[in-house]
Amino acid sequence: MLLVERALRDRRLLDAKWVDGYFGTTTVAAYAKYQKSLGLTGLDTNGLPGKTSLTRLGAGRFKVTNVIDPGTRVSTGGFVINTRTRSMLAEAKRLLGRDLTLDQGSYNPGGDPTSAGTHDGGGVVDVSPPHPPPRPPTATASARPASSATTSTATTKDRSPTSPDRSPTTPPSSPPATTSRDPATARANASRTPPPPSGTRSSKPSASTTTPATPAHTRTSAQAPKAT
C-alpha cells in the first residue's frame, strides 16, 4: 500500500502526512482523482484500484501481478454477487461452522445510501449470523421448591405477633384459681380439704370431730323444777 500512496504523493494527489500504509478515506479520495485524470467514469472512479488504473500508476515503480478475477455475476439468496465472493462466503461458513445470512449483495448501485457506493461495482457484501433461538426459562427462575414455600409459611405463622398459635415448647399455663363468694360453696370446698398426715396433730378440729356429750349434771339442771 505504501507504493501506491507514494505514487499518489508524487503526482501531488496525496499529502505526504497520509503516506502511512493505511488505505483510508483520504487515500481513496486521492485514488479517485487519479482515476478521473485517466478519463475513467462511473464505477471506474470509485477510488478502488483496478487492474487498468493500478498498472498505469505503477509504471516504472512496481508491477501488478496475481490479478484476481472476480468472475461472472450470479444470484444468491435474492442478491447479486460474483463467483469469487460466493466461494469466499462458502469458505467462511466452513471455517466458522455456522450459516451466514446475506443482507446486501455486491452489485446494488444506489440501493443503500449509507454504503457510500461500496456495493455498486462488486467486491463488498453485508452478512449477518442467524439469530439463536430464545432460551427457555430455567426452573430456578420460574418457581421455588414446594418444601421451601411450606417452611417459610410455617415459620412466618409461628413468629407472627398476632397469631393465636403458641410455640410447642411453651407449656400451657394453669387456669387461675377462682374464689367463690357463696358461703355454701365455700363450706363445700373446705370439706374437701385432705386430712393431715398420720402422726401430725392438727391445731384445728376436723370437720368430722364429734362434739363431747354433755355431762350428767348438765342434763339434770336442764330438767324442769319440781312443783312446790
Image: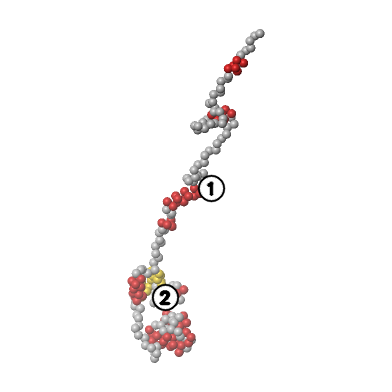
Nearest to viewer (mark 2 / mark 1):
1
Instruction: Residue at 41%, 84% (x, y): give it.
Output: 1
Whether tag 2 and tag 1 are in contact, CB under 8 A, the answer is no
Identity of the residue drawn at 49% across and 45% down = 170
Q: What secondary structure is found at the residue carrying circle 1? A: loop
Q: Nearer the viewer, residue 154 or 29?
A: 154
- Rendering quarter of residue 137: bottom left
Is residue 80 rendered to the left or right of residue 162?
left
Q: Residue at x 58, y 29 (%)?
A: 182
Q: Residue furthest right?
A: 228
Q: Residue furthest bottom?
A: 60
**Which residue bears the numbered disc 2?**
119
Provide residue 72's location: percent of width, then percent of height: 34, 76
Image quadrant occupied by the C terminus: top right
**Could you tell me if residue 224 is visible in this image?**
yes
Above or below, comparing residue 35 to residue 129 in the picture: below
Residue that mark 1 sits on: 161
Q: Amino acid at mark 2?
A: His
Q: Is residue 196 left or right of residue 84?
A: right
